[in-house]
Amino acid sequence: MKLRLFTHSLPLSMFAVTMFAVPLAEAQTVALDGKVFVADAGVKGKAADEKDDVLTFANGRFHSSSCDQWGYDKGAYKTSSSGETTSFEAETNSAKYGKLVWKGTVRGNEIEGTFMQYPKPGMFNSNPDPIEHWFKGRAKT
């Protein structure tokens, strides 16, 4: 009899967990949705080689306009907040060039962080080293 009760309560339990988890996941992106920043970027330790990149957070997706030319897509992002700071992580992918893993913080009107470029393996380099980049900017006015 107890087993029967458990099998009937399991779907209800799973439904309850889903009902609480979905709003939590949505809440993690709402903090930055609708925000747009203009940033400069470069390889770690070097001067900016990319100027005025438009970084957009919309509908739970992150987008870098400068990466369009290499076929990088918009990627889902996650956030966490602590006081006045919102941290985010995102991944964008290019079928031809590989993936970028973004990590950054937003404080007021300022954004900064890093992204790791994981180049797609090729014929002459089957295991390319990742390349760390930095970015820093302000809210678009």
Image: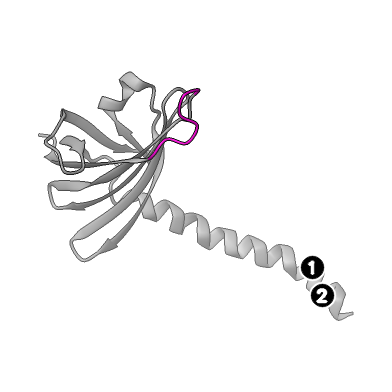
Q: Amino acid at mark 1?
A: His
Q: Which quadrant would residue 62 be assigned to in this image?
A: top left
Q: Which quadrant would residue 116 be assigned to in this image?
A: top left
Residue at point 31%, 19% (across, down): 69
Tags 1 and 2 touching, CB below 8 Å: yes
Q: Residue furthest top?
A: 69
Marks 1 and 2, how far apart at CA: 5 Å
Indicate yes or no whether the magenta region holds residue 114.
no
* Residue 10, x across and y down, in percent: 73, 67
Residue at point 13%, 40% (across, down): 137
Residue at point 79%, 68% (across, down): 8
**Secondary element at image label 1:** helix
Residue at point 16%, 43% (across, down): 45
Q: Which is more toward the observer, 54 or 141?
A: 54
* Residue 117, x across and y down, in percent: 35, 37
* Residue 114, x across and y down, in percent: 26, 46
**Secondary element at image label 2:** helix
Label number found at residue 8: 1
Q: Which is more toward the observer, 21 or 107?
A: 107
User: Is residue 57 found left or right of 123 in the rendered image?
Assistant: left
Q: Which residue is mark 2?
A: 5
Give the colour scheme of this rendering.
Answer: one colour
Q: Which quadrant would residue 87 be assigned to in this image?
A: bottom left
Q: Residues within 10 Å of mark 1 (few under 14, many from 20)?
A: few
Main secondary-structure element of the magenta-colored stretch: loop
Q: Quadrant for the C terminus, please.
A: top left
Q: Residue furthest front?
A: 124
Q: Quadrant for the N terminus, please.
A: bottom right
Q: Residue furthest bottom?
A: 2
Q: Which is more toward the observer, 64 or 45?
A: 45
Highlighted magenta segment, given as a residue range: 123-129
Using the rendered image of the protein, determine whether residue 38 is visible from the camera's viewpoint: no
